[in-house]
């Protein structure tokens, strides 16, 4: 690994001509980003006046190298250094951390590969990407593996094969259809190719099939039909295997020259979890809806305004004594964080928020429920203003309401209100590649978050600031 790390760093540091001569690659290009995220928060872990102040500044560095490997084949490697990778050798990705880098040699283990793939172009109209990669779309509710926007600046990746059919060069309706298929392995527990599931276990496999149409019908910018499938083998026996499927149908677009924009998607679970005898199979029957509308008036003398409303509801289960799990799940159920939707600076992005159900992901990232859980319902209203007198500046306000989808369990009432949150953000886009933002947020917790009547429910507050600098651009297949 150290030799590969050294090679990647040499490619980045060396000039294009000397790199080409050194490894025989062509058309080398580089890209990457530097991100800094500072947070100061109170009451996240206990909702009380007891000291749980958090003040930390995290960093994430991404360095990518693209190259032509041979005719019709391109390749990419990307190295990432963030708290997730650098904490193993000390807190070297945190400002002031005990493991601050002191030499290039000590920094090698802080960088890890999140991209290492080859891409085959235009094979009978298909492109294929094989290796470690990112998948899904930024902001997607259930299917995104890649750089995240939480306070910990998490990055996830997966080893797999993605094939894409794109006929955008055609001028008829076929040029507006896009088909993508992915199959990958998030976790492989075997240490040799000879091991069987009977002697080893813990594999997690993920698959995605998606057909989309862009600008095929008036007012519909995109129509998407998708099927996701994941399975997890927990132990050497088959009595606890989990098979989760997510069916999705969504549309988005705009009317009146995008004066009004909208988003609507329906998601449904199927599959099940085997359970040791005498219990029967637990069947997944959850569903979710994701709705959004925005209004974008024409510019005024003082600037441009935009308002929006979003509603997300993931079903819950009000009866955990039967064999039907009506709570909606994404692949977090299999131990893989596959959402890139964040509901609030605190409820959504805070990796330290109390009662996060044992997950290292924020409580409000995505809508996955615990097995036969209560589900989640989120309402979001927002306003953004871009002033004329400072064209690179913007201000944004968001209000969120969080509650469980179910308020009873087995016929008895249970706490269902998580609380409400307000986020105020001010941003400055110095250029397309340089952005700054900061703000203040507060969360008013309720009994479903704090633990019930009589528990401490002091307001959670958070100051945040972020800076992002990007360079180059990853070569992406179309």
Image: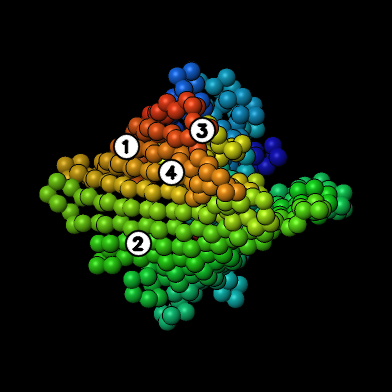
Above or below, comparing residue 116 to residue 84 in the picture: below
Q: Nearer the viewer, residue 467 or 225?
A: 225
Residue found 39% across the figure and 49% down from its top: 379
Sequence-first disc among 4 and 2: 2
Looking at the rendered image, the quarter that the N terminus falls into is: top right
Given this view, does label 1 or label 4 mark the residue nearer the observer? 4
Above or below, comparing residue 252 to residue 64 in the picture: below
Sequence-first disc among 1 and 4: 4
Instruction: List the single residue furthest toward the bottom.
Output: 172
Residue marked by disc 2 = 262
Given this view, does label 1 or label 3 mark the residue nearer the observer? 3
Residue 272, position as x, y percentages in the image: 69, 58
C-alpha distance separating marks 4 and 2: 22 Å
Crowd rating for badge 4 (residues with CA inside 10 Å; few <14, some 14–19, many 20+): many
Residue 108, position as x, y percentages in the image: 63, 32
C-alpha distance separating marks 4 and 3: 15 Å
Q: Nearer the viewer, residue 202 or 12?
A: 202
Task: State the mark number for residue 452.
Answer: 3
Under circle 1, the secondary element is strand
Residue marked by disc 1 = 424
Number of numbered discs present?
4
Q: Nearer the viewer, residue 277 or 346?
A: 277
Under circle 3, the secondary element is loop
Task: State the mark number for residue 402.
Answer: 4
């Amino acid at each position: 690994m150290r030799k590969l790390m050294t090679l990647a760093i040499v490619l980045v540091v060396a000039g294009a001509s000397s790199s080409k001569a050194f490894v025989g690659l062509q058309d080398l290009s580089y890209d990457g980003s530097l991100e800094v995220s500072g947070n100061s928060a109170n009451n996240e872990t206990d909702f009380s006046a007891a000291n749980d102040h958090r003040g930390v500044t995290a960093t994430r560095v991404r360095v990518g190298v693209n190259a032509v490997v041979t005719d019709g084949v391109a390749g990419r490697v990307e190295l990432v250094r963030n708290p997730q990778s650098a904490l193993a050798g000390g807190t070297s990705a945190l400002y002031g951390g005990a493991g601050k880098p002191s030499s290039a040699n000590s920094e090698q283990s802080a960088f890890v590969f999140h991209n290492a793939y080859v891409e085959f172009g235009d094979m009978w109209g298909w492109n294929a990407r094989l290796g470690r990669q990112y998948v899904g779309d930024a902001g997607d509710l259930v299917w995104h593996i890649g750089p995240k926007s939480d306070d910990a600046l998490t990055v996830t990746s997966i080893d797999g094969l993605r094939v894409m059919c794109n006929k955008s060069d055609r001028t008829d309706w076929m040029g507006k259809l896009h088909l993508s298929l992915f199959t990958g392995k998030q976790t492989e527990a075997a240490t040799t190719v000879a091991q069987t599931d009977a002697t080893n276990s813990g594999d997690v496999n993920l698959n995605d099939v998606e057909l989309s149409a862009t600008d095929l019908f008036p007012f519909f910018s995109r129509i998407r039909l998708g099927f996701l499938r994941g399975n997890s083998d927990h132990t050497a026996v088959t009595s606890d295997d989990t098979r989760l499927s997510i069916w999705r149908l969504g549309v988005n677009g705009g009317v009146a020259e995008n004066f009004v924009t909208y988003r609507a998607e329906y998601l449904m679970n199927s599959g099940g979890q085997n359970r040791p005898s005498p219990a029967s199979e637990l069947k997944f029957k959850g569903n979710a809806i994701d709705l959004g509308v925005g209004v974008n008036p024409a510019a005024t003398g003082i600037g441009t305004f935009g308002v929006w409303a979003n509603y997300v509801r993931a079903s819950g289960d009000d009866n955990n004594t039967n064999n039907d799990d009506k709570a909606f799940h994404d692949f977090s159920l299999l131990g893989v964080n596959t959402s890139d939707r964040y509901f609030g600076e605190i409820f959504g992005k805070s990796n330290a928020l109390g009662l996060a159900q044992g997950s290292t992901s924020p409580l409000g990232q995505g809508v996955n429920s615990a097995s036969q859980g209560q589900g989640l319902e989120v309402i979001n209203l927002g306003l953004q203003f871009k002033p004329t007198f400072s064209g690179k500046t913007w201000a944004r306000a968001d209000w969120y309401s969080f509650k469980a989808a179910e308020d009873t369990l087995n016929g008895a009432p249970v706490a269902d209100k998580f609380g409400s949150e307000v986020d105020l953000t001010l941003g400055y886009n110095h250029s397309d590649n340089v952005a700054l933002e900061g703000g203040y947020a507060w969360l008013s917790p309720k009994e479903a978050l704090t633990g019930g009547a009589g528990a401490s429910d002091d307001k959670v507050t958070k100051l945040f600031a972020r800076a992002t600098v990007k360079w180059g651009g990853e070569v992406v297949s179309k």
